[in-house]
Image (cartoon, rainbow, N blue to C red):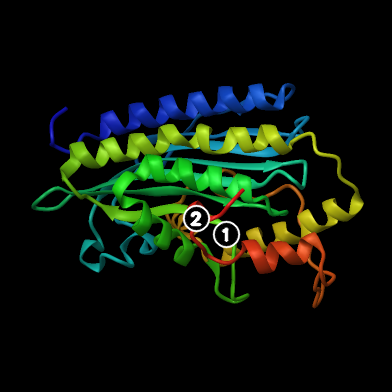
Amino acid sequence: MSDIPNLDQVKAYLIDLQNELIAALEVADTRAKFIQQDYPTPIGGIARPRVLENGLYIEKAAVQFTHGRGNSLPPAATARNPELKGRPYEAASMSIIVHPLNPYAPTMHANLRFFLVQSKQPFWYFGGGFDLTPYYGFTEDAIHWHATAKKAADRHYDQFKQNCDEYFYITHRKEARGIGGIFFDDWTEGGFRESFKLIQSIGNAIPHAYLPILERRKNTKYSHRERSWQLYRRGRYVEFNLAIDRGTKYGLQSGRRIESVLASLPPLAAWKYDYSPAEGSPEEALLNDYLTPKNWLAQKK
């Protein structure tokens, strides 16, 4: 593999990963299939939205690939690199979101992206990661999630975990979205070849991080109480995506198909005015014991 940035290699890998994740999630659900569509993106490129709804175990999942071009990077992509404003670019990205039906099974999110900006010297970078949003806390799930993340990110895990804890934070609520994972942006360390290897390591880890947890929780018995709590906490997920998430802002600013941009939102969510869970309840334990950044790998199952 050459160390010259190669968008075609990245595209091929992300499409293969998209296909792998779709197949794995269909097996996990056992009933529902993904809707498969292809759309051209502005100024060339293609979007491959893949959405599953109303499954036996998965209420909604979206596994999206996009290759886009533009004459000028959107503000969400230049906030950290203002010198790139007004420059033509290409970008390839893959994202996945899974909203299980069972409240004891957590929501998961992952994305990988590559930007190539036209300038005197080719400017490129990778970004991405994955994070977990449980509705009920299970230490063994958190340990498995972070152990898989650590293996994938290797020596970068500690920094990527801190990035994730800081990014997936609902500032207007002053609370974490979930139990974190790994997250990075503007990544070029070691050149294209080494950076791409890291991306592949993280991408390949996604099904190993999530599917065992989904399998463990998807048949757990639940009642209206747990379902109501799940929908209430999904409201927090919606707030983060619409008010804070840079990926959502980038999609809206770059003119992408709105159905694809908002496919990550859950099919149902709820808000309750000034609500607090009962003292000593599992719901309170989620807020107090799990949605606080910690070294999960030092915890006991």
Q: Residue at x 46, y 51 (%)?
A: 255
**The disc labelled 2 sits on which kind of residue?**
Ala
- The image quadrant of residue 2 is top left
| Residue 44 visible within the image | no
- Label 2: how many Cα within 10 Å (few below 14, some 14–19, many 20+): few
Q: Residue at x 77, y 51 (%)?
A: 268
> In the shown orientation, is residue 117 left or right of residue 108?
left
For label 1, the SS is helix
Q: Relative to 235, say whether 45 is above or below.
A: above
24 vs 119, nearest the viewer: 24
User: x, y (%) of residue 167?
Assistant: 46, 64
Q: Nearer the viewer, residue 138 or 43?
A: 138
Mark pair 2, 1: CA separation: 30 Å
Q: Secondary structure at mark 2?
A: helix
Please identify the quadrant where the N terminus is shown.
Answer: top left
Residue occupying image coordinates x 86% and y 45%: 222
Q: Going by the picture, which residue comes out furthest to the front?
A: 300
Camera-near label (2 vs 1) is 2
Mark with earlier residue (2, 1): 1
Q: How many marks?
A: 2
Callout 1 crowding tier (Cα within 10 Å): few <14, some 14–19, many ≥20: some
In the image, what residue type sits under mark 1? Asn
Residue with the mark numbered 2? 298
x, y percent for residue 57: 75, 33
Residue 237, position in %: x, y? 64, 59
Residue with the mark numbered 1: 241
Residue in the picture at 14% in, 53% down: 119
Answer whether residue 58 is visible to the viewer in this image. yes
In the rendered image, residue 186, in percent from the top left (x then y), is placed at 28, 55
Q: Classify residue 258 as left or right of residue 52.
A: left
